[in-house]
Image (cartoon, helix red, strand yellow):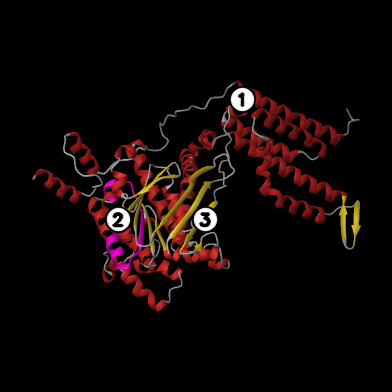
């Protein structure tokens, strides 16, 4: 059962002079287990879209369903939030408990997970993000380093065992090492639990490397939903929106102008390498 | 949360907007004193006309001024009823069961209500036509003489400016944190009062921490731009009294004088003159 958005429209402050339609008539299905990346310029409605997917915002027109749960209904919405985990930008700013363990347990406790199951879940989540429970569990979350805080906050969501994990620019403000460790974590999580991942990102390289599908938003509308190969093989369209293109796409264009034509639809570095070696040999 | 308008400033360029904030503060004080001096109902026509005149002059829609009275409506009704029933008096207007309503009580209730309405209406016109920054600037200048007595007028004004500046930022932050906790299954809508108060902790702790972090960063940013308090500090916009201020002051003083004179005449009898 997927997350289905059906002709969803959301307007902030409707009826006032400052009314602003952030998401306009978007239909989109998040398949089980897929890695979907959402890209688009600032203000294109990416954050609004992910908040609509777990019922933090309610669609004014159209409907959002999570595994047949209707998000316009309050009870079903609460249930759905347990299945759809949402990691905001800078999630470390939501930490509030005295110890890391307590903070990670906040989500599952709200989901009415029985007490005897809690510590198992917390340890599992902490291990998954690479914070050993015996070392970090009893620390105050405010004594952790920036990267550790981010991972502790992420563990707080993972402990809810979401079936869909939504992340709004999860790597913002991290160094390259921190970024790649988050990416590795997401893949490990997906391999292990089969959960679907929806990631909003500005880094086209990360999108190209990881996404199964890419959704391109502009001005509240969904203008493309396709494989990264198809999306990034037309880099001029992304540039027109003010978006960057992945390094690999730039490399392909540069090779083409110098007369080296590689087959279409390649967007991963290692695939390019093999293709290039073939052409050269 | 999203409908709170703070400082409720209504931007414009009317004569009322252009008045020096110091003039507006001082005249507002005079206006309040006059309102409480008046003790004849008929004389309230004058301050009322004055406020209406100022509203028309300021181009602020009347609905904005009345909107500021809206939160007051319960207090108004409550005060009116309390005064109506519990003011001692002799001339009975109405009496049934054990309740007596006297004409003195009715008068008292009317006074209280009118004073309150004029008070809030007039002062909200000031905040509608003066930006919070201008208001704190004016306040700082007015309190300046007190700095001889070591009263920290500049620091006070700077604190007020910073507080006003950060209210929207912190509101935004609170909404963001609330959403993040709701995504973790927190429920802020149901439960009894105690549970609801408890459910605020996951919002308040991160909010306070972020407020402290911001304060720290701001202090650092101000220091790195050589801020060292009010001494010797010049301003980008110097406050200057203009002809407008003189006219406004004359009008207010004239109205005040007229009210006081009329009141004196009424109390001592017209015939005596």
The span from disc 2 to disc 3 (Cα, nearest Å) is 38 Å
Q: Residue at x 28, y 43 (%)?
A: A233
Residue B106 within the magenta-colored segment of the rendering: no
Which dot, 2 or 3, sits closer to the camera? Answer: 3
Where does label 2 land, which residue?
Answer: A146
The span from disc 1 to disc 2 (Cα, nearest Å) is 55 Å
Where does label 1 land, which residue?
Answer: B245
Is any part of residue B204 visible from this angle? no
Where does label 3 land, which residue?
Answer: A63
Which dot, 1 or 3, sits closer to the camera? Answer: 3
Q: Pick the quarter of the image with the C terminus of chain B.
A: top right
Q: Residue furthest bottom?
A: A116
Which dot, 1 or 2, sits closer to the camera? Answer: 2
* Front-lying residue, A30 or B233: A30
Q: Residue at x 35, y 41 (%)?
A: B221
Question: In which quadrant of the rendered view does residue B26 lie?
Answer: top right
């Amino acid at each position: 059962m997927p997350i289905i958005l059906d002709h969803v429209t959301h307007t902030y402050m409707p009826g006032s002079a400052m009314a602003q339609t952030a998401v306009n008539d978007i239909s989109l299905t998040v398949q089980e287990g897929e890695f979907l990346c959402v890209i688009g310029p600032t203000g294109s409605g990416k954050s609004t879209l992910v908040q609509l997917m777990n019922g933090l915002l309610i669609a004014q027109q159209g409907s959002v369903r999570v595994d047949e749960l209707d998000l316009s209904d309050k009870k079903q919405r609460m249930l759905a939030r347990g299945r759809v985990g949402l990691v905001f930008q800078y999630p470390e700013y939501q930490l509030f408990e005295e110890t890391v363990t307590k903070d990670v347990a906040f989500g599952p406790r709200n989901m009415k997970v029985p007490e005897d199951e809690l510590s198992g879940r917390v340890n599992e989540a902490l291990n998954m993000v690479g914070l050993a429970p015996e070392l970090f569990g009893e620390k105050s979350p405010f004594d952790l380093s920036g990267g550790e805080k981010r991972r502790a906050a992420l563990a707080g969501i993972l402990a809810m065992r979401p079936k869909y994990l939504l992340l709004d620019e999860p790597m913002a403000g991290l160094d390259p090492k921190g970024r790649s460790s988050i990416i590795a974590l997401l893949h490990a999580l997906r391999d292990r639990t089969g959960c679907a991942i929806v990631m909003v990102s500005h880094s086209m390289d990360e999108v190209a490397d990881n996404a199964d599908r890419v959704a391109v938003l502009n001005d509240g509308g969904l203008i493309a939903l396709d494989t990264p190969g198809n999306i990034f093989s037309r880099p001029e369209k992304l540039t027109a929106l003010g978006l960057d293109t992945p390094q690999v796409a730039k490399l392909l264009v540069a090779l083409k102008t110098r007369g080296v034509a590689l087959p279409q639809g390649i967007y991963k570095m290692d695939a390019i390498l093999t293709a290039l070696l073939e052409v050269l040999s | 949360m999203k409908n709170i308008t703070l400082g409720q400033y209504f931007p414009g360029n009317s004569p009322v907007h252009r008045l020096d904030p110091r003039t507006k503060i001082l005249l507002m004080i005079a206006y309040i004193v006059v309102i409480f001096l008046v003790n004849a109902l008929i004389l309230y026509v004058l301050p009322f006309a004055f406020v209406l005149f100022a509203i028309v002059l300021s181009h602020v829609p009347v609905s904005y001024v009345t909107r500021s009275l809206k939160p007051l409506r319960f207090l108004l009704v409550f005060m009116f009823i309390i005064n109506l029933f519990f003011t001692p008096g002799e001339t009975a207007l109405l009496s049934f069961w054990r309740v007596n309503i006297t004409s003195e009580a009715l008068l008292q209730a009317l006074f209280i209500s009118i004073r309150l309405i004029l008070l809030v209406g007039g002062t909200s016109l000031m905040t509608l036509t003066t930006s919070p920054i201008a208001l704190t600037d004016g306040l700082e200048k007015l309190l300046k003489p007190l700095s001889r007595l070591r009263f920290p007028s500049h620091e006070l004004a700077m604190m007020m400016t910073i507080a006003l500046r950060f209210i929207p930022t912190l509101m935004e932050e609170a909404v963001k944190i609330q959403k993040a906790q709701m995504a973790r299954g927190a429920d802020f809508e149901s439960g009894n009062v105690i549970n609801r108060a408890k459910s605020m902790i996951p919002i308040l702790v991160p909010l306070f921490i972020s407020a402290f972090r911001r304060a720290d960063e701001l202090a650092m940013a101000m220091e790195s731009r050589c801020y060292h308090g009010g001494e010797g500090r010049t301003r980008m916009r110097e406050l200057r009294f203009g002809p407008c201020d003189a006219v406004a002051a004359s009008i207010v003083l004239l109205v005040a004088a007229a009210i006081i004179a009329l009141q004196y005449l009424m109390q001592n009898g017209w015939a005596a003159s």
